[in-house]
Image (spheres, rainbow, N blue to C red):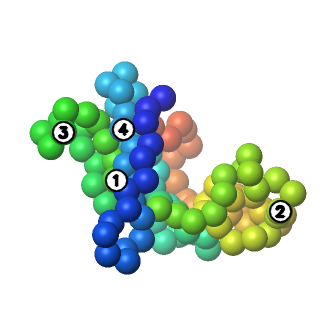
Amino acid sequence: MGAVYELRLAEAHPSLVLKVYPQEFQWKMQKEVALCGRLDGRLGVPTPRILLADDSKSLLDLNFVVNEQTRGRGPSRARGQPGQRGGAIRVHADGTALREFHQIGMEAFGYIGPHGL
């Protein structure tokens, strides 16, 4: 849907992730920002912390998000290795992340969109 880049700083800081969204997927960028904000500090596994999100195209002529990089592997690479620490998308044998996610109260039932439910 868009390009994803790892940004490494000269000092010993953690890497950052730059995600660029085409105009037709601007709503997905807004949804990601809203969802990460809702999850921040509420799961027992690391979730991406959004540092900057800009869909105004005032800094760059692009819609983009910059977040801290979370370590771990996505589900496609984690199969067969349940229970190891990683990011929120990590596969857990006991379903910890999924169970914690579903325990977060919502103000209503519905689709999670770019501006909430």
The C terminus lies in quadrant:
top left
Position of residue 40 in the picture relative to residue 54 (left or right): right
Depth check: 25 or 61 in front? 61
Give the CA separation, mark 4 to mark 1: 9 Å
For image coordinates 50% across by 41% down, the residue present is 112
Give the CA separation, mark 1 to mark 3: 12 Å
Residue at disc 2, secondary structure: loop
Q: Which residue is mark 3?
A: 60
Q: Residues within 10 Å of mark 3 (few under 14, many from 20)?
A: few
Closer to the N terminus: mark 1 or mark 2? 1
Amino acid under disc 1: Val
Depth check: 111 or 11 in front? 11
For image coordinates 28% across by 55% down, the residue present is 52
Whether residues under marks 4 and 2 lie with C-beta atoms below 8 angstroms apart, the answer is: no
Q: Which residue is mark 1?
A: 66
Q: Residues within 10 Å of mark 1 (few under 14, many from 20)?
A: many
Give the CA separation, mark 3 to mark 2: 40 Å
Give the CA separation, mark 4 to mark 3: 10 Å
Q: Position of residue 101 (x, y in %)?
A: 62, 59
How many numbered marks have been drawn onto this rendered protein structure? 4
Please identify the quarter of the rendering in which residue 3 is found: top left
- Asked if residue 38 shows in the view, the reply is no
Amino acid under disc 3: Leu
Residue at disc 3, secondary structure: loop
Q: Which residue is mark 4?
A: 20
Q: Which residue is mark 2?
A: 81
Amino acid under disc 2: Gln
- Asked if residue 19 shows in the view, the reply is yes
Please identify the quarter of the rendering in which residue 71 is found: bottom right
